[in-house]
Image (cartoon, rainbow, N blue to C red):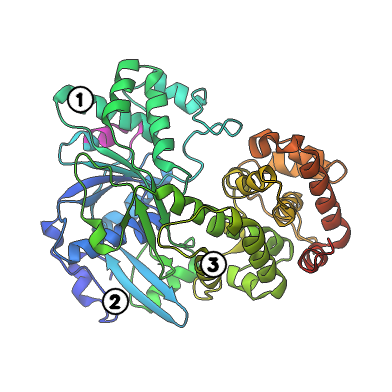
């Protein structure tokens, strides 16, 4: 039986289901981008809240602006907008059906239905998970790029925009004209200073065609920063089989680790659900939590990803079981990253690092090394390069981080050390493979990517260290270089 309201009572007793009347829910949030992470994170928090009898006028209305969003809508509709979440603790699986979504806006060119939905006075929050690379950030300046073709197209056709930022601007314009207060825009993507980045995209696009509206948005609309965290692998045959074994006929099941965290600024002029009752942290110090997570967790993912990929290790927990890779991660985190992470309220950074190592080691999650290697050209400037930059500025050693950058270069050459071909794994893969081939003879070719390294390429110590690391990886292989780093002989 397909998952639906009518079949909930027929689910096995081991599968938890919504403990509230879904018919009593009313939407207060439009969420754009209803992929795995959203359904394992924000939707779960709201499901917990509704089960307490709280905030039931804050249900989710799903939405999207891409072809993939339309496919997601088509799969969720027969399921009455529900999907399952399977938490994977070591040795135990816990399945639940999440009922926090009450509908999904039709996905159409020009985004008319989305704009209409966001114009509804009942909608007081518009939230987003559109991936780290979806914010039109100029890689060289780190700021919004107003000359991107997508942005210029929306500026020429603001009444029928293609991007989510154009749709948000159009809905805010309609609300202002109707005398309806602005909604809050809540970014849930893993982007540093994500509220500010989202504000820059909405205001920057709007300024191209309606400066007065841009000024109004800048003055009246809240864009709170947030930090989100939960390891959520892609769904494939294994995950679908797992759902079936648990008695779930779900087209879009999600698996995830048990851990989850959500930290936000409390800036919601139009109101918000009382999420603090289900574990969300509201604080003015989001930036501290964000830096901790991005440097230690996301940076840690990169540290294990590229040596593992080169050594033909397929799964993250298998990488953590390799003594060399685990020791490499631990040493870089302890010696090079933790000392430059600012203090975080009520948090022991060494304990947080230990938690991260445990989370990475969970064999039930079966996260893939390939997923961690994905989109390095976008992730390295956010997760690794800032740590290198901070250590260089402080006159401190960054050998392990620079070695990781050399391993990324070697990975982008396009073959593992066994000679196996690496399938394209970055939006800029062709450029990266060509540059990595040239860098084999001239390492400066790699550092010349200003959009990644900025002016670090001009630092003679960084350039010399990178050339040394890359040469050693090519001559001696990944395992030998990791050993040399760990024993201090590199």
- Element carrying mark 1: helix
**First in residue order: circle 2 vs circle 1:** 2
Query: Mark 2 touching mark 1, by CB under 8 A?
Result: no
Mark 1, residue position:
176
Point out the tag, 3 or 2, that comes first from the N-terminus. Answer: 2
Q: Position of residue 447 (x, y in %)?
A: 75, 39
Magenta-colored stretch includes residue 114: yes
Q: Which quadrant holds the C terminus?
A: bottom right
Tag 1 or tag 3, which sits nearer the N-term?
1
Q: Nearer the viewer, mark 3 or mark 2?
A: 3
> Which secondary structure class fits the magenta region best?
helix
Q: Position of residue 298 (x, y in %)?
A: 55, 56
Residue 15, numbered circle? 2
* Residue 250 located within the stretch drawn in magenta: no
Locate residue 382 relative to residue 246 in the image: left or right: right
Nearer mark to the viewer, of 3 and 1: 3
Q: Nearer the viewer, residue 73 or 285?
A: 285
- Eyeballing the image, is 239 above or below 465? below
Give the residue at x 85% y 41%.
442
Which segment is the magenta one? 108-116
Please tell me which residue is depicted at 37% across the width and 16% down the height of the picture.
209
The residue carrying mark 3 is: 350
């Amino acid at each position: 039986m397909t998952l639906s309201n009518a079949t909930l009572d027929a689910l096995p007793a081991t599968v938890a289901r919504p403990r509230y009347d879904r018919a009593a829910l009313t939407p207060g949030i439009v969420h754009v981008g209803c992929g795995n992470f959203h359904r394992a994170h924000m939707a779960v928090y709201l499901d917990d809240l509704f089960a307490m009898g709280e905030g039931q006028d804050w249900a989710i209305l799903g939405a999207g602006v891409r072809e993939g969003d339309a496919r997601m809508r088509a799969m969720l509709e027969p399921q009455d907008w529900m999907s399952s979440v399977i938490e994977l603790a070591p040795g135990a699986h816990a399945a639940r059906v999440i009922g926090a979504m009450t509908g999904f806006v039709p996905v159409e060119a020009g985004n008319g239905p989305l704009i209409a939905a966001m114009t509804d006075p009942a909608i007081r929050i518009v939230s987003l998970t559109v991936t780290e690379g979806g914010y039109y950030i100029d890689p060289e300046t780190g700021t919004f790029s107003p000359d991107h073709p997508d942005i210029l197209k929306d500026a020429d056709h603001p009444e029928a925009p293609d991007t989510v930022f154009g749709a948000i601007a159009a809905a805010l314009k309609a609300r202002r004209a109707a005398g309806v207060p602005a909604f809050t825009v809540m970014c849930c993507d893993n982007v540093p200073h994500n509220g500010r980045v989202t504000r820059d995209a909405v205001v920057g696009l709007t300024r191209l065609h309606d400066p007065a509206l841009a000024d109004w948005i800048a003055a009246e609309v809240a864009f709170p920063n947030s930090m989100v965290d939960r390891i959520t692998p892609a769904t494939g045959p294994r995950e679908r089989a797992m759902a079936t074994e648990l008695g779930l006929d779900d087209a879009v099941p999600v698996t995830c680790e048990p851990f989850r965290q959500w930290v936000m600024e409390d800036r919601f002029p139009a109101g918000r659900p009382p999420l603090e009752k289900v574990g969300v942290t509201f604080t003015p110090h989001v930036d501290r939590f964000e830096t901790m997570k991005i440097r230690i967790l996301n940076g840690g993912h990169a540290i294990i990803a590229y040596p593992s990929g080169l050594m033909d290790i397929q799964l993250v927990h298998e990488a953590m079981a390799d003594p060399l890779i685990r020791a490499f991660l631990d040493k870089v985190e302890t010696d090079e990253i933790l000392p430059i992470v600012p203090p975080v309220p009520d948090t022991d950074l060494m304990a947080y690092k230990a938690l991260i190592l445990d989370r990475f080691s969970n064999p039930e999650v079966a996260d893939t090394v390939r997923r961690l290697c994905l989109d390095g050209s976008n992730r390295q400037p956010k997760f690794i390069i800032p740590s290198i930059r901070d250590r260089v500025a402080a006159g401190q050693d960054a050998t392990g981080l620079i070695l990781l950058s050399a391993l990324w270069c070697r990975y982008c050459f396009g073959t593992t050390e066994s000679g196996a071909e690496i399938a394209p794994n970055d939006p800029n893969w062709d450029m990266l493979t060509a540059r990595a081939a040239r860098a084999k003879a001239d390492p400066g070719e790699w550092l010349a990517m200003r959009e990644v390294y900025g002016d670090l390429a001009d630092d003679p110590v960084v350039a010399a260290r990178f050339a040394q690391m890359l040469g050693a990886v090519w001559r001696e292989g990944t395992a030998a270089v990791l050993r040399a780093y760990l024993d201090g002989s590199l």
